[in-house]
Image (cartoon, rainbow, N blue to C red):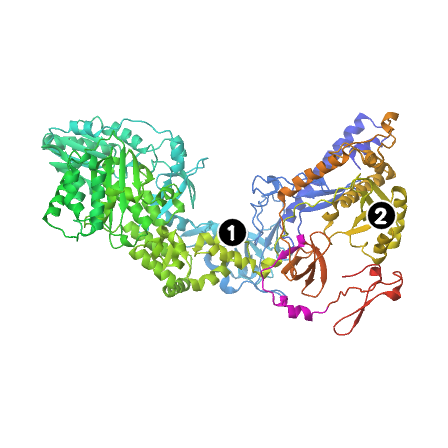
Amino acid sequence: MSLQERLLRESDLTLKKVAEFLRASEASKHQIESVKSASEVHEIQKNRDKNSKGTASYTKNSDSDTVFNCQKYGKEHKKLKCPAYGKICSKCKRKNHFAAVCKTVKKNYRSVNKLENDNSPNSGMNLFIDSVTEQVNNDMLIVNSLDSMWFKKIDVENNMIEFKLDTGAEINVLPLSVYKSMCLPLKCALSKTNITLVSYGNFKLNPEGELILNCSVNQYHKVPLKFVVVVNVSSRPILGLSACQKLNLIKKIEQVETISKDSIMDQYSEVFKGLVNKPTEWVNSLVIVEKTNGKLRICLDPRNLNKAIKREHYVIPSVDEIISRLEGKQCFSVLDLKEGFWQVPLDKDSAELCIFNSPFGCYKFNRLPFGICSAPEVFQKKNQKLFGDIKGVEIYFDDLIIAGENKEEHDKILVEVLERAKENNIKFNPNKFQFRIEEVKYMGLLVSKDGIKADPSHVRAINEIEKPTSKNDIKRLLGMVNFLSKFIPNVSAVTSPLRVLLKKDIEFQWNHEQETSFEKIKRLISSTPVLKVFNDSLPITIQCDSSKDGLGACLLQEGHPVSFASRSLTDCEKNYAQIEKELLAIVFSFEKYHNLVYGHKVLVESDHQPLTSIAQKPIGKITTRLMRMLLKLLKYDFTIKYVPGSQMYLADTLSRASMKETGGDDPEMLNVVHSVSKLLPMSESRFKQFQKATEEDKELQMLSEYFKKGWPEKKVVQRNLLPYYKVRNYLYCIDGLVFLNDKIIVPTILRQDMLMLIHEAHLGITKCKSRARELMYWPGISRDIEDLINKCSICEKFQKSQTKEPLENHELPSRPFQRIGIDNMYLNNTDYLVIIDYYSKWIEISKIDNKSSEEIICKLEVVFARFGIPETIICDNVPFNSYQFRNFGKEWDIEIVFISPHHSQSNGMVEKAVGISKADFKKAFEDNRRPAIGLLEYRNTPISGLGLSPAQLMFNRRLRTKSPISNKLLNPELFKDVNIKLLRRQQTQKHYYDRSSKILNELKPGVKIVVQKVKTKIWEPAVVLSKTKTPRSYKIKTLYGRVLERNRKFLRLSKVNHKSYNDSVLDTLPDVTQVVSTPPQNVMSTDSQTSISTRSGRNIKRPNHLKDYVCY
């Protein structure tokens, strides 16, 4: 009873009495809460039964409403009305509870529950102990052996006692027998305690008392600890969690061990230098590169960031400006800033844009990373600010040149630069330090006391070009000359001796005339006016190419060559894939011309078209070797343009006639090759299996041969290798395996095994293809995956239902009651017959006593007497497919159309009528009225999209209802164009329905299929027998000999080779559903029922409930 109700029952209620009642109620509430809180503490301290959920306790109030003391809400609430339901906890982010009662921070109850000690002498405390004794009952399972326990000998008041270390206990337990055996001083006497120990199974132990003892272990001496002495216990003493921590016997272990994380930080210290753990809205892609010494280097892929950066425009000094200030100098030094960009600190806003994810959280660069498009200008501005005011110092990005008229002046400037660098923590690269020399290379020129002159290395590649040894070599050389012909005077006369050798009837012979012409051509190309001095104000173009033996590059400005470069490939580089060689040529050209192109936009011309798309991909999405090369190019601003090889005269000639010297093997490139095979996710045995299969695979061995010697023309390539021709630029061989990018090419003999591994979990075609594309490759892998899954019996059995077919409308009737649909409706233990007119949508409902054909025919006769006999009846097979109902149709001259079994959409009109009728009846019963009112209103309501009601379509007039209406509206009227409106409405419905439909092919007799079970949705094997008169329906025969009729929606072509599909096997199966050849004369008589014989001769009698039907 509520307090308000209790007060209202008082007859002589006064204000004073109300105040007394309220005070008493408030006091009793506080007492109840104190009792409840005590019980709740007690409840927390005992282990919950594993089978008990314990999410709420139940109480009954005075109004008999069920009230929950809900642990999800923290308060009481009524049943099924928890305010916490559906809410998300702010602590653990899980649903259906609040943070105030969240238990995620609470650990599972260990040996002793964690409780706050109440120091009040009158307070009691229940502490749970996991195991006090080592002795257990015979019916209990011993889980922990002595070997797995944790023991430690401790000096307790000069007594060596062996304790069991229990990190789950918060109290120290000392058996009484051990206590008596100890020699303790008089001050260590037992005192009373109010602590109650609760062991596993909620068995309570009353301690004898408690005392404080000094304990010593290792370097910890005389640490006072409280012990509880227990009687009748023969176990070892227990040292709890708090005592273990005080004596430093245990350490808290995190999810990632501190030592492991520190060792990673130490090993890869450079990765985490200058990084701050702070979240941000902008996250860049991270590329992790392993160095040759095993250390890591982190890089950003800032190409997306570069699109959003507003580039800072700072005036970069031109070559002419710097060179003009170096005139008259006698002594020079060149300093190169070590990892120059990393010496530029970022402000707070800029650092927020350079964030990336790592295994240890979210970090950001606090210093300028490589690849930022505005980095050169920022770097130049910073260096100019630091060293620009020192006379005799010229700065060009990361190169500082110090020039003095004599050594004393030079040394003075150098000392000032080094002191300035020390003050600002600037580091220089000692390996690139050119100290106090009279001639120095700077910005592509040679600077000396005699003045400025061109660097001979720019034309060395031309001067050392090998002379032609065949007609093809002469064609390439003349192609280069023709490309520069507009800059060479009298070029025709100079090249005439070489062109003579190209005639068909002339044998190739290299004579003095050809040698003279060749030397003259080299001299003309490597001097003015052909060769031009670099001008940083003009656009820069680099033309580079790779052949099977060398690299070639040429720097061009306005069509004039500025510098030529070439080198031979190392033995390792000759094994690169062609796309890797082409990108290597670009890297070579940029490293060669770094002083000329750094900080400028460069157009790179290449005859390898795949490079244009590779350069646009995220760096982490390409092969490791290409990734390493692109990382080297991050600091340059360039665009790759595809130029056909027939127009790459300069670079092509230089690469094929390259200088003999090589760049030496790049150890980083060697490391990438090693890591590709090292990081393959396969065991050693699988790796050897692939190696052996690849060695025995003729197709892959021929690929390896093409890879080493170069691909021939497409028309010469073997037919079985043509699929590889399109991807030839991405193929490479490592450790006896063939790769396409990072995907291994599977040998023929292992492909079936790999297919089974991919499809081991029976995922769908799309997911299996996606998974396979990440791991492996062979020509036709997608087709093989499709064939495997299509022939998988398990996948076929559990595949999803087919997409619906386009809507096939019934022929539109031209008048009311020409075509009707009928069906049974069951509601509230009563059967009804529902009839709907396909023209007017008029619904008739008749109550039937049973579903027999006689009862249904009787109701239909009454309706036909009212509206006339229809031409067509559309109905289900059951219960209307009986002999008596068919005979009724013949007698009344009615065509009866049966829909496909289990496909109610075929008679969607009557299904809709059943739904409308059920809804009307349910609402009527709930409202205590007769359903006829709802049926009348339906018949008088205009049809959506038509504007006319069923009554108007049926009788050309409205029906009078309880609603007021004028006589004029009740008068009959003739409606025109009704059929046109009905047809338009039907076409609109079909248009929207067909948008998500799919046409299914017609099935021929004898075709192997699978049929879907209606209830379980499982597909089972079957064979098509024939097509029925019902649209899209077929007669099929299952593996068990059953003959069924099913809609095309439930039938699917099968590619699985089921053994039972064999016709001979099907013929031997018993046909348990033989068709009745002669209908019984009296369908109601049980004597006329046909018996069915099985193959063994046993007679099967048809059940009584099927006596009115013909079975198939």
> Total number of numbered labels?
2
Work out whether 469 lies above or below 367: below
Q: Does the magenta stretch include residue 397?
A: no
Please state the extent of the stretch shown in magenta in the rendering. Answer: 1048-1070
Rendered location of residue 693, percent (x, y): 40, 64
Q: Is residue 1065 magenta?
A: yes
Under circle 1, the secondary element is: helix
Under circle 2, the secondary element is: strand
Horizontal side, residue 148 vs residue 894: left or right: left
Work out whether 399 lies above or below 1085: above
The residues bearing labels 1 and 2 have C-alpha atoms spaced at a distance of 75 Å
**Taking the image as drawn, is residue 237 in sight?**
no
Marked residue nearer the N-terminal end (1 or 2): 1
Residue at point 64%, 43% (across, down): 994
Extreme residue toward the front, this view:
505
Residue for badge 1: 241
Rendered location of residue 487, percent (x, y): 19, 34
Amino acid type, callout 1? Leu
Report the quarter where the C terminus lies. bottom right
The picture quadrant where one finds residue 135 is: bottom right
Residue for badge 2: 832
